[in-house]
Amino acid sequence: MSNMSKSPGKSAAKAARTAYVCSECGADYNKWQGQCGECGGWNTLSEFIVEPAAKAGAGGGVAASRRSSWAGRVDAPAVTALKDVRHSEESRVSTGIGEFDRVLGGGLVHGAVVLVGGDPGIGKSTLLLQAITRMAQTLPGLYVTGEESLSQVAGRAARLGLPLDGVHALAETGVERILEHAAATKPALIVADSVQTLWTEQLGAAPGSVSQVRESAARLVRYAKETGTAVFLVGHVTKEGGIAGPRVLEHMVDAVLYFEGESGSRFRVLRAFKNRFGAVNELGVFAMSDKGLREVPNPSAIFLSGSRSPQPGSCVMVTREGTRPLLVEVQALVDSSPLSNPRRVAVGMEQNRLAMLLAVLHRHGGISVGDQDVFVNVVGGIRVQETAADLPVLLAVLSSLRDQPLAEHTVAFGEVGLSGEIRPVPNGEDRLKEAATHGFKRAIVAKGNAPRGGRIGEMEVIAVERLSEALDAA
Ligand code: TYD
Ligand code: MG
């Protein structure tokens, strides 16, 4: 926060001032304006009371002497040679849930603050309740609920058969009280469910408003950094997509994990959007069952649509989100359009990328879909962000256009360039091995990704350099 940088003597005497904070990117301004100068969002600024720095640490349940230089600081900063700073190896604790550990970068780091976002009902509370109870042996936990009653939480834990020793629960939304309890019981892990219900006495704004969410979270972050307590903040995503207000939290926390899933599907994907202690885009895959969330350690199978006999408009690709290759099916439907401006709809990938790929298909593949509606869907509710999806998308589009399935047991991946070349993508061998393990017989990939003998195990690898070659091979 910019107010922290003010000269301490002055700000201690100053009264609270009003700032205007963008709910999309967190930029703050002294005056209200219609458009955020940082991210360009319209009507995203809302009022935020900035308290004087001296007051910031007080009443937080933490002794003033322990206030670190990271938070609202009072003393002049001491400069230290970096080599003299004492540090410890970041020690990690397993959450007891392998897929959760994977997304965290190999377990929970002591003192880390992790924001878990997702739509209401996706399973955030369930996941964290499972994690906090399993970790209780090593990290005594405090589960703070502002949404459910204690008996609901206890009932759920009992129904899921979770071990309850070592976990305290608190139904409370006032940050001051939460921190008092934390100071008294000294948990090593706090779950705050949800950050939208939190409020601090120091602000007059209503709970759920940007300023309350931001200040309450800042209090918990400060507490975490001062005491080495790990904190999970739960945040609901609003209709607009950002976690309400919590977009502004992304920069204060160590990791941001989003829980995604299609309504109607029992599979859930936890994705690391930011992680100071691990790879971003790492995916953890879970299935919601009547016994809570179960991990899916070998997720490749679930993202294939199920019918293994080849269908027109379908192509299997190997994506590599995070550190693990994953087989995912891409489906396309190409149909003559009644519209003068045919539709291009992409679900699970970027729409603009689809438009660009169709232009390359026309220009360098000689195949026009200018009078056709094109719909592309990535099966299983997963979002593919990497360019390895380019080639499979075009193969699926071609297959739908011709109404001919691709040869059975074929996979593809590769980036398509604007001049019609097929470019290699990172970790080609890993991807090919994953496909071979799942019984695929043929792979169409960029030349740079093909192994020397043209085979991986039983699988034949067809190397292509140009889009036209790839279309011929398919
Ligand atoms: P929940 O964790 O409360 O979601 P969130 O905290 O993200 O809002 O999950 C609620 C949903 O999960 C609800 O629709 C019921 C379902 N569910 C199961 O199917 N099985 C279970 O064992 C549990 C605990 C929940
Ligand atoms: Mg919940």
Image: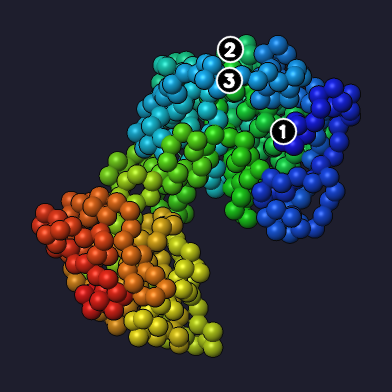
Q: Residue at x 31, y 61 (%)?
A: 424
- Residue at 45% across / 62% down in the picture? 349
Residue placed under numbered mark 3 in the picture = 81
**Which quarter of the figure is the N terminus placed in?**
top right
Give the x, y percent position of residue 137.
41, 16
For disc 2, the neighbor class at 10 Å (few under 14, some 14 to 19, many from 20) is few
- Mark number for residue 417? none
Judged left or right of residue 151, residue 371 is left
Locate the C terminus and report the quarter of the image it occupies: bottom left
Nearest the viewer among 388 and 178 is: 388
* Type of the residue with mark 1: Glu
Residue 86 shows up from this direction: yes
Circle 1 sits on which residue? 215
Relative image position of residue 321 (x, y in whole percent) = 38, 50
Mark 3 to mark 1 CA distance (whole Å): 32 Å
Image height of 144 relative to 333, above or below: above
The residue type indicated by label 3 comes to: Ala
Task: Give the mark, 3 or 1, whose residue is nearer the N terminus.
Answer: 3
Q: Could you tell me the amino acid type at mark 2? A: Thr
Q: Position of residue 444 (x, y in %)?
A: 23, 66
* Picture residue at 21% right of the left edge, 63% below the top: 443
Provide the secondary structure element on which disc 1 rests: helix
Name the mark nearer the viewer: 2 or 3: 3
N-term-proximal mark, 2 vs 1: 2
Q: To which quarter of the image does residue 41 belong?
A: bottom right
Mark whose residue sits in front, 3 or 1: 3
Residues at marks 2 and 3, CA–CA distance in whole angstroms:
36 Å
Please tell me in which quadrant of the rendered image residue 182 appears: top right
Left or right side of 106 for 461: left
Residue carrying label 2 = 185
